[in-house]
Image: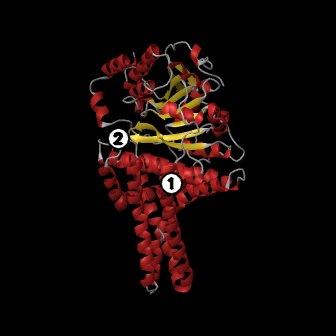
Amino acid sequence: MTETTGEIGAPPPLRARPAPSGHRTTAAPRPEDLPTRTWHRRRPGPRRTRLAAAHARRSRGRQAAVEVAAALLGPPLLGFLVYLPLAFWLPHVLQAWFWVVFVLLLLTTLQITTECARAARFPEPPLRHELPDEHLPTLAAVVAAYLPNETDVLLESVLAHLRVDYPVDRLLVVVAYNGPAPEGSPAARTERGLAELAAVDERVLPLRVEGSGTKAENVMAALRHLEGVVDVVAVFDADHHPDPQAPRRAARWLSDAAGDRRFDVVQGQCVIRNRHDSFVARTVAAEFAVIYAVAHPGRTVVHDFGIFGGSNGWWRTDVLAQVGLDPAMLTEDIDASVRALAAGARLGTDPRLVSSELAPTTWRGLWTQRMRWAQGWWEVSLRHLRPLLRDRSLTRVHRRGIALLLGWRVAHPFVAAQVVPILAARLVAGDRLRWDLLPMLVAACAVLGISVLQAAVAWRLAPPGHRHPGLYVRYALVGTLFYGQLKGVTTQAAVVRDWLGVHRWEITGRTSRARRAGHRTGHRAGHRRLLRAAR
């Protein structure tokens, strides 16, 4: 690949690495440079139907309104139109389908309950004791950033990476970023701040990725400099502050010293540090405890594999280079996870590998973020579900986990939406529902009660400093009243959005109330403070 002026080749070994001088510039990897498998199909282009074309001409607000309306009304209305004739002419078939839906919902509740029960039993790292400094693997933390969006948080995050407890001669912090930085803009000042940090600390390597439009391209550009140089690559978003002990614990999972018990990927726990900013941030803080302290560890124990969540994910460098991150995917992290699993990699989860991040502080920001996640999961399901279920190199436990993760995860909200139209069709047909109302109420209570169970387990397993009882009581109440239903609607709306041909990367804002207050002191004063801390 032809590279731009000023680019260097692979850095020398860390012990002999000279102090960086200014920025490095590299080109984003081309799609043909990314690793592929024979079953790894490229994502098809946008749909060219008249309906998709008309939808594309709408404003983003109207697009979202159409997608939500279709998600809320489409499944029950279509179901009712199908069930009404069955209620008149084949009532026994409809009644049988009702019981199928009822059993599926109860089995889902049982599955989540099992994961909650197993969450506390996640395995410890293969190495029981910390490695001495001379035996630690060489490590690069790759911080991916879109500069105009993350000028408020990037430099402080780089400092957090420099404060970790890890030998200086075995650590690099590569800031792989893209985006415009006009002279005099906050982005340009942040770029200068990165250069100044690199001048005072040789572990920092700023890397501008020309032509990049995605996080995946930034990470892959950084990886081209790191392959064959470091043993472990940790991928972080620009707002993440890793716990100082995280690298040493990750080394116990990924070091060659673990021998045959060594893992190839381990995902840590992400916690929210701006939970005081808004009601939305508090909700996300509790939800992240449910996801990273309960769901991920429990699922890893039950299905024998973890998933890379996009940030605070630690990879063996050779494995990440082999698998790659696909910039065509909205959730390149989940896509890489299932491809790594298919390639024979071992993926683990460790909730004691902690990193803090910023949550969206508004409902609009949260909706934007979750729609991208939901559509990305749907794309991964379309691409990988069938090939992985047919892949006999995976164990039966793995394939069962894939079926639940990529199949039933998407189907569940559509199936749950069928209970009401089934009962409505039977009522219209004059059927009496005395015996069906009780199972419906049982299923509803079981589904709604899951939020309470998850909140209770998350409170018990959350890391120190994040076990505030009121936070989880509020989450249990919010989850029962509407938040669980909101997540289901998001999944349905994402399927509608993909069907209508909308495929775009929505940027999540990276700021908090504290950061906005600090921003008023000026970038220059902030940069001077950060440089003093670096020295």
Q: Residue at point 51% right, 48% down?
A: 297
Q: What residue is pinned by disc 1?
A: 118
- Observer-nearest residue: 325 or 444? 444
Q: Is residue 532 left or right of residue 131?
A: left
Q: Residue at point 49% right, 16% down?
A: 202
- Observer-nearest residue: 395 or 46? 395
- Quadrant placement of the N terminus: top right
Count neighbours of disc 1 (C-alpha within 10 A) and say few if under 14, some if 14 to 19, many if 20 or more: some
- Quadrant placement of the C terminus: top left
Residue 156 vs 288, above or below: the answer is above
Q: Is residue 172 left or right of residue 455?
A: right
Q: Residue furthest front?
A: 129
Residues at marks 1 and 2, CA–CA distance in whole angstroms: 23 Å
Q: Position of residue 405 (x, y in %)?
A: 56, 54
Q: Residue at point 35% right, 46% down?
A: 467
Q: Which mark is residue 266?
A: none
- Residue 315 visible to an observer of this rendering: yes
Q: Position of residue 67 (x, y in %)?
A: 45, 56
Q: Secondary structure at mark 2?
A: loop
Q: Position of residue 394 (x, y in %)?
A: 68, 51
Q: Secondary structure at mark 1?
A: helix
Mark 2 and mark 1 in contact (Cβ < 8 Å)? no
Residue 345 vs 206, above or below: the answer is below
Look at label 2 and name its amino acid.
Gly
Residue 89 vs 247, above or below: the answer is below
Look at label 1 and name its amino acid.
Arg
- Residue 59 visible to an observer of this rendering: no
Q: What residue is pinned by disc 2?
A: 465
Q: Position of residue 143 (x, y in %)?
A: 49, 30
Count neighbours of disc 2 (C-alpha within 10 A) and say few if under 14, some if 14 to 19, many if 20 or more: few
